[in-house]
Every structure is written in C-alpha cells, then in structure tokens.
Amino acid sequence: QVQLVESGGGLVQAGGSLRLSCVVSGSIFRLNDMGWYRQAPGKQREFVASSPSAGTPNYADSVKGRFTIARDNAKNTVYLQMNSLKPEDTAVYYCNAHNQFTTRVNWGQGTQVTVSS
C-alpha cells in the first residue's frame, strides 16, 4: 500500500519561508514523478511544482523564482522549499506521486500553509 505523508506546514508571515516534506512508502520512489499541488478555500486544486523521475522540475508561473522542488531518492522524500511567501499562497498543500511503471497516482493527506499579511 502506497502512503504519502506530508509535513512542514504552518503559519508564517508574508515574506517568510517554509519547507514542506513528503515521505513516500510502499512504492519504488525513483520510479515516481513527484508533484506538489495546493487547494485554497473555495478554489480548485492547482499544480504548484513537479519533479519527474527523469528530467527537470516544472513550476507554476505563480511560484517560479520563489519555490524550489527537490527530491532525495535515498530518503524516499520530496521537498518544497517556499520562500518569499505571499498571503495568496495560503492553501492546503498536497503531495502527489505518479508511478511511471504502474501508472498509479497517489495523494497525501495534505498540510496547511497559512501566510499572514
């Protein structure tokens, strides 16, 4: 059974930083394209960043230059470093794993990020 567990969310002032972590178990991590998504109240879930199993990271335009996604295959973990946070970054952040071999997609439970102005 594949499990994704996010951590690192919290309350931060505008301009501050947070680092989210997502640990994956039950799957061969290096075979997964990993991604971060977020969902603000009353809005649809949206793409934030991705780290392919092979290739370069991708980012939503709204976070380019502020957020960095990184993966550690030895630790089965993907990170999202978030700098220069804005109130509009407030959302529940979800980790996503897309296994390139099985094509199965799994989601974490989410972690709340709140940015105060």
Image: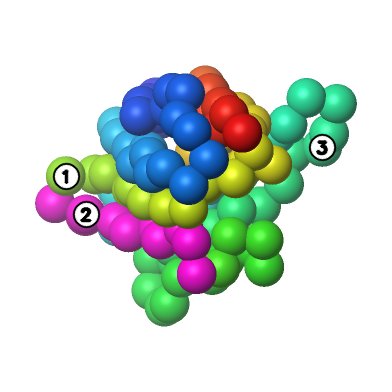
Residues 52 and 19: in front is: 19
Q: In the rendered image of this protein, does residue 68 appear above or below residue 80? A: below
**Can residue 18 be seen?**
yes
Q: In the rendered image of this protein, does residue 97 appear above or below residue 12? A: below
Q: Amino acid at mark 1?
A: Lys
Is the Cβ of the residue at disc 1 closer than 8 Å to that at disc 2?
A: yes
Please tell me which residue is depicted at 38% across the width and 44% down the height of the picture: 17
Label ID, residue 72:
2
Q: Tell me the residue that label 1 is attached to.
A: 75
Q: Classify mark 3: residues with Cα within 10 Å, few (<14), some (14-19) or many (20+).
A: few
Work out which residue is located at the far right of the displayed protein and give it.
42
Please tell me which residue is depicted at 72% across the width and 47% down the height of the picture: 46
Q: Position of residue 41 (x, y in %)?
A: 78, 24
Work out which residue is located at the far bottom of the displayed protein and give it.
55
State the extent of the magenta-drawn residues as a range.
65-74
Mark 1 to mark 2 CA distance (whole Å):
5 Å
Q: Position of residue 109 (x, y in %)?
A: 52, 21
Which of the two marks, 3 or 1, is nearer to us in this view? 3
Q: Tell me the residue that label 3 is attached to.
A: 44
Q: Amino acid at mark 3?
A: Gln
Q: Position of residue 54 (x, y in %)?
A: 38, 74
Q: In the rendered image of this protein, does residue 5 appear above or below residue 44? A: above
